[in-house]
Amino acid sequence: MLKRQTEKMIQELCQSNVLRSVSTTDPIVLCASDDNYVKPLAVTLHSAATSLRAGNHLHVVLMDGGISESSWSGLRETLLDLPISVHVLRPNRQEISDLVTSHHITHAAYFRLLAARLLPDSVDKVIYLDSDVLVKSDLTELWNLDVGNHYCLAAVDIACPFVDAYQAQAKNRRYRKAIPHLAAISPIPNWRQLKLDGSASYFNSGVMVLNLARWRAESIDKKLLACLRDNASHVWCWDQYALNVVFAGHWGKLPARWNQGVHVFEFPDDTHSPIDPEEFVQMRDDPALVHFTTEFKPWEFQPFHPLRESFYERLDQTAWAGWRPEKPKFSLKRWWDLKAVYWIRKWVVNYRKARSIFAWGANETLDP
């Protein structure tokens, strides 16, 4: 019975022709998920729909990486009577099955790279959202931004904002205070071999406005996949590596508040910010969108994220109301791993402080 109901629901949602006639003022959002991310996906879609201003409607294209029948039922219950339409795509996993995955990332993370080919040609722009975000502002604001001739609009990654942080510091001494607190110094490890500008900004791929018209014109999907395969031993942060390499110098910046990564809370204050201090404060204190980055997710037991309760407040408005993760049994390995992460992080911060001071001293003749 449940299977028949689910099949009927998917048929209702899978209306590809609808996207050919949607109003150009209605945002079109692209998401990808498997069954592991259904609860946060429900939070993402519910918060996006309820944050719309009266009269606005949201069209969502959901790339299904293996969502179960019961989860589909929960999503339908969650979105019932909200101003949102969901259209389902099922990409071929075999096309990306050789690409590297690790930690909490599955192959569904690469689906976004296929967007231009899988969406109808009539859709020349789309907002991409990871399925672990909490939307707090009307996505119509994001939709109305002019993407111009950029491949995409995206926000600088607050955890690793430069292709190489020491190259950026050599040009601007203000970044010296930020460097010790970054998650990565060189998120594109082979940037020299690729002839990239080490001091350039590096973006987070979890929130983007994609220029699908340009992607199609230049067969960008093939270039992105080739980049990942040709540089497999250097790939860090999965799809984000390829997007930053291929789009280098041809992407536009979103206001930082449209992608609040958890790393924003690692910096002591705005004087340590690797981005404009005013934008940093807006991202930290008034985000338009909260992105639950890193493997420490709020739906897991570890209470690391400072906005964890905001996630559960929204989850309680979905079909998964009242759900909470169970406390895991004590594990010496898990306890040790968490302690090791803490002490390694402290050592890295102190090491980088010393190196940053030395690096600036060696370049003190440069303009600040």
Image: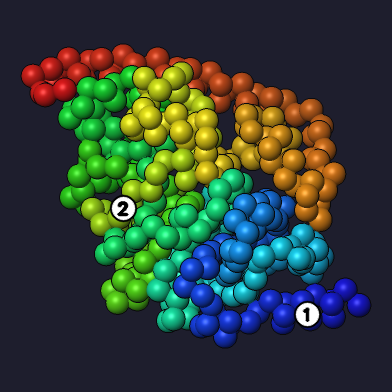
- Relative to 166, is 58 on the left or the right? right
Question: Given the current orientation, which residue lies at the most extreme right position?
Answer: 1
Residue kind at label 1, given as amino acid type: Glu
Residue 43, image x and y in percent?
A: 68, 51
Is 24 located above or below residue 105 in the figure? below
Q: Quadrant of residue 35?
A: bottom right
Image colouring: rainbow
The residue beneath circle 2 is 252
Q: Secondary structure at mark 2?
A: strand
- Relative to 245, is 210 on the left or the right? right
State the residue at coordinates (25%, 15%). 357
Residue 30, image x and y in percent?
A: 53, 65
Q: Quadrant of residue 93?
A: bottom right
On-image quarter of the C terminus = top left
- Relative to 181, is 358 on the left or the right? left
Is 85 located above or below residue 34 in the figure? below
The residue beneath circle 1 is 7
Question: Given the current orientation, which residue lies at the most extreme left position?
Answer: 365
State the residue at coordinates (34%, 71%). 215
First reached walking from the N terminus: tag 2 or tag 1: 1
State the residue at coordinates (77%, 65%). 80
State the residue at coordinates (33%, 19%). 177
Residue kind at label 2, given as amino acid type: Gly
Alpha carbon distance from label 2 to label 1: 40 Å
- Relative to 131, is 251 on the left or the right? left
Is 53 located above or below residue 66 in the figure? above
On-image quarter of the N terminus = bottom right
Q: Quadrant of residue 314?
A: top right
